[in-house]
Amino acid sequence: MQGNMKPNPVHPNRGKGRSPTPFTRACLASCKTVLSRIERAKEAIFMESRLVLGAQERLLRLALNEAEAAAWETMYPHLVFPALASEKAQAVAAWNAHQQSVRRNSPIAATE
């Protein structure tokens, strides 16, 4: 009976133990480059936004993560991410400034 069985085209161990092909190595290198570029841009935008715009660190990290997730949905995440991240960082800074303004002008804050 074993001789009549068809080979399984999707074998779970297929490819294990073999060295990666040049194409696989090129793909991995490309992915690592894109990841590295996005990470460097994320840190640069974080530092600039935190220092210059006065944005809250936690909210800024969340906004940058959201921008990264949206960028990965495109065909060119490393090109799209910086613009998305900058917009998100500016929105966080604007929200933060608005909140401070509201707190300063609040009648409750004036009576405390």
Image (cartoon, rainbow, N blue to C red):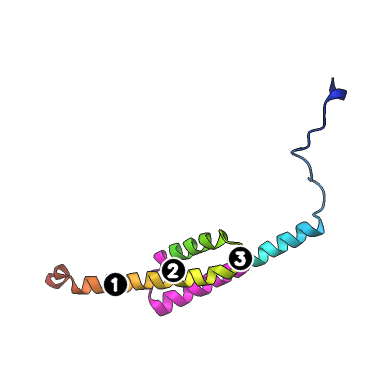
Element at label 2: helix
Q: List the single residue furthest toward the left.
A: 111
Q: Residues within 10 Å of mark 3 (few under 14, many from 20)?
A: few
Of the residues shown, which amino acid type is indicated by label 2? Lys
- Whether the residues at callouts 2 and 1 have beta carbons within 8 Å, the answer is no
**What residue is shown at x 41% (from left), y 73% (from top)?**
90
> In this orientation, which residue lies closer to the viewer: 59 or 82?
82
Q: Measure how far apart labels 2 and 3 are at the Cα level.
A: 18 Å
In the rendered structure, find residue 54 and report the number of the disc placed on it: none
Read off the magenta span: 35-60
Residue 7 location, quadrant: top right
Residue under pointer 2? 88
Dot 3 corresponds to which residue? 76
Residue that lies at the very extreme toward the right in this rendered image: 3
Q: Is residue 41 one of those drawn in magenta?
A: yes
Residue under label 1, please give it: 98
Please tell me whether the stretch drawn in magenta is mainly helix, strand or loop. helix
Instruction: Report x, y in % for residue 71.
Output: 54, 63
Circle 1 sits in a helix, a strand or a loop, which is it? helix
- Secondary structure under tag 3 reads loop
Give x and y (percent) for residue 102.
23, 71
Query: Marks 3/1: CA distance?
Result: 33 Å
